[in-house]
Image (cartoon, helix red, strand yellow):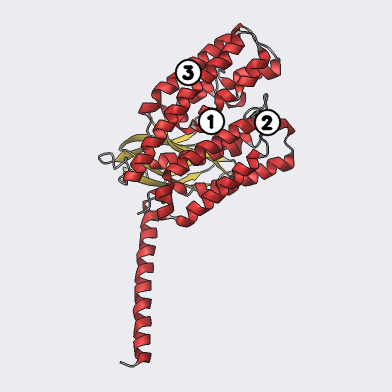
Amino acid sequence: MSARRSTAATLLTLAVATAALAGCSQKKDDKAAADAVKVNATDTACEVSKTSFPAGHVSIDIANKGSKVTEVYVYAAGDKIVTERENIGPGTKATITAEIKAGSYEIACKPGMVGDGIRQKITVTGDGGSAAPTDPRLTAAVDAYRTYAQEQADATIPAVEAFVAAIKADDLEKAKSLYAPSRTGWERTEPVAESFGDVDPKTDTREDGLEQGQEWTGWHRLEKSLWADGRIGDDEKKLGDQLVADLKDWQKKIPEAEITATSMANGAKELLDEVATGKVTGEEDRYSHTDLADFVANVEGAKKAYELLKPVAAEKDADLAKTLDSEFAAIETLLAKYKQADGTYTSYDKVTETERKTFSDAVNSLGEPLSKLAAAVVAK
C-alpha cells in the first residue's frame, strides 16, 4: 500500500473512531438528559416531569420560569431536607445531582424563597439504590466529613454556653463580643443542621423569615435584643437557655445525619448560596453587622467539603479542580483584608457598596464551578 493510501486509510479509521466516540458520548448525554427529573418552577406552580423514578444517583434539572428568585427542595418525612438549591434567579437554570434512597418524598418550589413551597409528591423506587459511594476514597471523605461536622457541633456548645453565660450575668458588651464566635461551627456545617428540618428554624431564623404563628427564638432574636434594643432581661436569659438546648439537640443528631458524597458537594454550594442571599446583602446579621465572620465560616466549611472530595474530583475533572483551587484562594485573600488584629472582622456596616459588589462577584465566581462538583464526583 502506498504511503498516500496508508495515510488516507489511517485518517478514515480515525474519523470513524472519532465519530463512534462522539456518538457514544452523545448517546450518554442524551440518556442522562432523558433520565433527569425536570422541574419547571413558576410563581404559582412546581411542575415535575416524573413523579416516580429509580433510587440512586438522581439529576434534577430546574428551570425558573417565574418572576421571583426561587429555591427547590427535596423533602423526606418530617420535612427532613434531602437536597436543595437556593437562589435560582428568574429565567435561569440549575442542576442538582443527589443520591436518593427508595421512599416517599416531596419536591417543593419556593418562589420568593419563603414559606412551605408549592409541593409535588414523588416516589423513589427500588431497593434503596447505592446511597453509599463505591469508591473507597469517597467513603473515606464521607466519614471524615461526618467527623468534621461532629467536631464543629462539639466546639459550638461551649462557645454558645459562654455567650449565654454573659447574657445571664447581664454583661451586654461581653455577650456582644461572644455572639459571632458562638456561630462559627454552625455556619461551617449549616447544611447538615438544616437537613434535620426542625433545628434550623429554632436557632437561626431571622425575623422576616418566620412562618405564620412561629415563635421567634435563637441567635437572631438575641442579636436584636443586644444590639437594637440594648436590653438583657428575663426573656433573653430564657431564650439563651433554649438556644443551648436546641443546639445540644443538633449536636446529638450528627451521627444520624444522611451524608453522602453528593450531599457534601451540594452542601458546599448551599454554603455559598447562604453567603449570596444573606451575608453579602447584610441581611443575616443586620443588627450586629458581624456578617463577615459568618461569611468566612461558610467559605471554610465549603472548602473543607471540597478538599475531602478533591482526590476524586481532580481525577475525573482536573480543570474543575484547578478552577476551584483558584477561586477558593481568591475569596480567602479577599476576606483576609478585612480581618483585624484581634481576630474579628470589619463591621459590615463599614463595608461600602462597591466592596459588597466585589464580594458578590467573588461568591458568584466560586459558586458557578462549585455547582458542578457533585456531578464530577459521581461521574463514570
- Say which of marks 1 and 2 sits in front: 2
- At label 1, the amino acid type is Glu
Marker count (numbered) = 3
* Rendering coords of residue 296 (x, y %): 59, 35
**Is label 1 in a helix, a strand or a loop?**
helix
Q: Is residue 83 left or right of residue 209?
A: left
How far separated are the C-alphas under marks 2 and 3? 33 Å
Q: Quadrant of the C terminus?
A: bottom left
Task: Answer above or below: position of 118 versus 40.
Answer: above
Question: In the rendered image, is residue 91 in sight?
Answer: no
Residue of label 1: 187
Residue underneath mark 3: 246
Front-lying residue, 308 or 86 = 308
Q: Does label 1 or label 3 sit earlier along the sequence?
A: 1
Residue 341's disc number: 2
The 10 Å Cα crowd at callout 3, few under 14, some 14 to 19, many 20 or more, is some
Residue 2, compared with residue 236, is above or below; it is below
- Asked which quadrant contains residue 360, the reply is top right
Q: Secondary structure at mark 3?
A: helix
Seen as rendered, the residue at the extreme left is 127
Q: Is residue 87 above or below residue 214?
A: below
Looking at the image, is mark 2 or mark 3 nearer the viewer? 2
Residue 375, position as x, y percentages in the image: 42, 49
Residue at image coords 72%, 31%: 349
Residues at discs 1 and 3 in contact (Cβ within 8 Å): no
Q: Nearer the viewer, residue 137 or 54?
A: 137
* Residue type beneath disc 2: Ala
Distance between mark 1 and mark 2 Cα atoms: 22 Å
